[in-house]
Amino acid sequence: MIAIKAENISKQYRLGQVGTGTLTHDLNRLWHKVRGKEDPYLTVGEENDRTKSAPSDYVWAIKDINFEVKQGEVLGVIGRNGAGKSTLLKLLSRTTVPTTGSIKIRGRIASLLEVGTGFHPELTGRDNIFLNGAILGMTKDEIKRKFDKIVDFSGVERYIDTPVKRYSSGMYVRLAFAVAAHLEPEILIVDEVLAVGDAEFQKKALGKMHDVSSSEGRTVLFVSHNMAAISELCTRGIVLNNGSLLFEGQINKAVAHYQNSGNTQTSFEHKGSLDLAVGNENIKILKVKVLPLQKEFLTLSSGLAIEVEFYNNKPNINLSIGIIVKTFSEVVISELPGIITQNKDSRKGVYSIKYEVPPDLLNAGIYYINLLFGEDQRHVLYEKQQIVQFEILNETIGTNSNPIAGFLRLNRNATHQFLGQYES
Amino acid sequence: MEQNHEKWDTVINPSSGWLDIRLYDVWRYRDLLWMFVKRDFISVYKQTILGPLWYLIQPILTTIMFIVIFGNVAKIPTGGMPPILFYLTGLTVWNYFSSCLTKVSSTFLINANIFGKVYFPRLVVPLSNVVSNLISFAIQFGLLAVVAVYYVIFKGYVLHITSYLLLLPVILLLIAGLSLGLGIIISSLTTKYRDLSYLVGFGVQLLLYATPVIYPMSYIHGKYRALLLANPMSSLVEIFRLSLFGVGTFDIYQLLYSTIFTIASLFIGIIIFNRVEKSFMDIV
């Protein structure tokens, strides 16, 4: 059974100062409609790339997206900022309509990003449960039946007849979440907004999500930047990039696609004329790739291989290369040295170098690679900053799914034993 | 199984026909309507000393002001009714209209926050405004009744109970419908053209003077009469007073005009509102 079916959905937005010139646009639109012509503003508009400026004021936040979600499936929605995730959620939760296409839904949709919507500070917790529940689509009887469970889950029983403006922010969120969690929708949308809560709250939320999908057979759409959580919880994924669907399929492959979809890529490969390749008169960079040693994508335990191919234009020198791995905050993790020729016997042509970084060494995070080519290990032949960027995904250790501090993650080999009672 | 695939609970489309209005959805969310009414009512007097009494202070002070300015200074007749009763009656019914209209016409702007997050039939909000204003109307109506009883007992004022009294609920319904209809038209248009929200505030104030609240209908003659007749609220206020105290004029064509005006504005309002509620999040 298919729970959600999206067919060719697109959403167009107008950039700039909305409100100025809308009347003339409206009239123009109407004029075209009267003559039976197409909406003139639907034809303009381009791919939603924030970094480039474009002549048109209209952009497609999402364009021609098709996907299906089966009942009971946990679908991960992945994409960078501006990829169109939020727009997709807005369409699904019916707060706005698509410009073209249609979405068909079987069952009630609720989303955990609406936690606390419509809470009124002057009303008591009790009244707010009823108000919020009604906003989310429950009937009064339904809320009455679940009332005790909601109060119990929230743990604010003592304050239930106090206006919520007196609540601590934690109590507020717990009560709000409790209502949403008991809505029992057929389709649940979980946004990464959840990530703002404390660890306990996150665990509760993720746990609830897990229950909902596995034991109750509900459909879940999970939107997050936390690839570790995504790959752990989801079965399938869709990857959005600049408003279009990049990939739909098995979650691990989706995550791998995501890693390759950023502005700075995990791989760089030059094809075509040598003159056009990145480099200078001495060196041309042909290929830089960061690949997992095991598994399908880069995680703590996958290890990674760095492959570089370049063209050397200087014969008979002592050629060396430095592959510098830096963190996002510009801290150098390591400079992997490579002396390619030692006896002034370099040759014109393509060289290839490969390094391996073992599993369970680098911590989760985003890293850059700089390349440095030298002669006699002294003169710089060519230097290229940030040629590729790669991200190592976190993995859950014990029950902690949050990334832990540090550049290195060496804790796997720790040994521990119980030494007995303390004796002075 | 294949056939089953075509049975969807919700289909989200770009924009369906103009008349694709799901009033049934509104009915399904009737519990929400009551919750909104309750919220509106409670939140008004929370943390005030006088509480719901505030609903009375405004009409009392306004009535006193009207007596001084229009009764004593301008000496406008009140059709034989004691001025207090005359003004209070007009104000009670006018307040219901004006507070409904102003509240409803800000539906989208005030609730943008909720509307942006959850779907529910948006019409529930303006409907709940009309209902919750009925509570303040009831309170002010109570005040009117108390004053009337006082006049009957202590001043020997004779109440003329006529069969027009039966029209009272009809008048109320028409006023509710009219303010709802006009309000949702304005609120739909304000999403795009914010200018209207400024217009409504003083527009309603000005309309008061084109409505027989501070003068009886019979007082106006000549060229201004046409203006008075064009105002759909005129006959409603006049008949409201007539049904309670037997003072005023009744014109069936006037009532018919107001009724048609109300139905038309409701009809147009619901269509526009239905249209706007789908996409207004992109505009606001």
Image (tube, coloured by chain):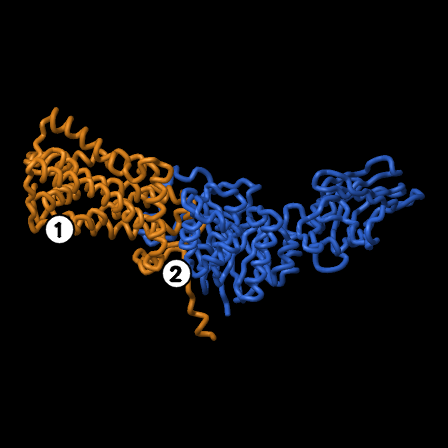
Would you identify the image quadrant in which residue B94 lies? top left
Q: Distance from label 1 to label 2 (Cα)? A: 36 Å
Residue A170 at x, y percent in the picture: 54, 45
Instruction: State yes or no: discs 1 and 2 in contact (Cβ < 8 Å).
Output: no
User: Seen in the image, is A54 located left or right of residue A285?
Assistant: left
Q: Is residue A78 left or right of residue B2?
A: right
Image quarter hosting the C terminus of chain B: top left
> Which chain is orange in the picture?
B
Indicate the amino acid at tag 2.
Asp
Give the letter of the blue chain: A
* Front residue of this view, candidates B66 and A34: B66
**Which element type, helix, strand or loop, lies under badge 1?**
helix
Q: Is residue B165 above or below residue B61?
A: below
Q: Nearer the viewer, residue B65 or A389?
A: B65
- Badge 1 crowding class, 10 Å Cα cut-off, few under 14, some 14 to 19, many 20 or more, is some
Question: Which residue does the numbered mark 1 point to in the structure image?
Answer: B167
Which residue occupies 44% across, 72% down?
Answer: B4
Residue A320 numbered mark, or none: none
- Residue, disc 2: A141
Residue A181: where, in percent of width, then height? 51, 56
Mark 1 — on which chain does it sit?
Answer: B
Residue A111 visible to an observer of this rendering: no
Q: Is residue B204 left or right of residue B237?
A: right
Residue B228 image point, x, y percent: 13, 38
Horizontal relation, residue A57 to residue B218: left or right: right
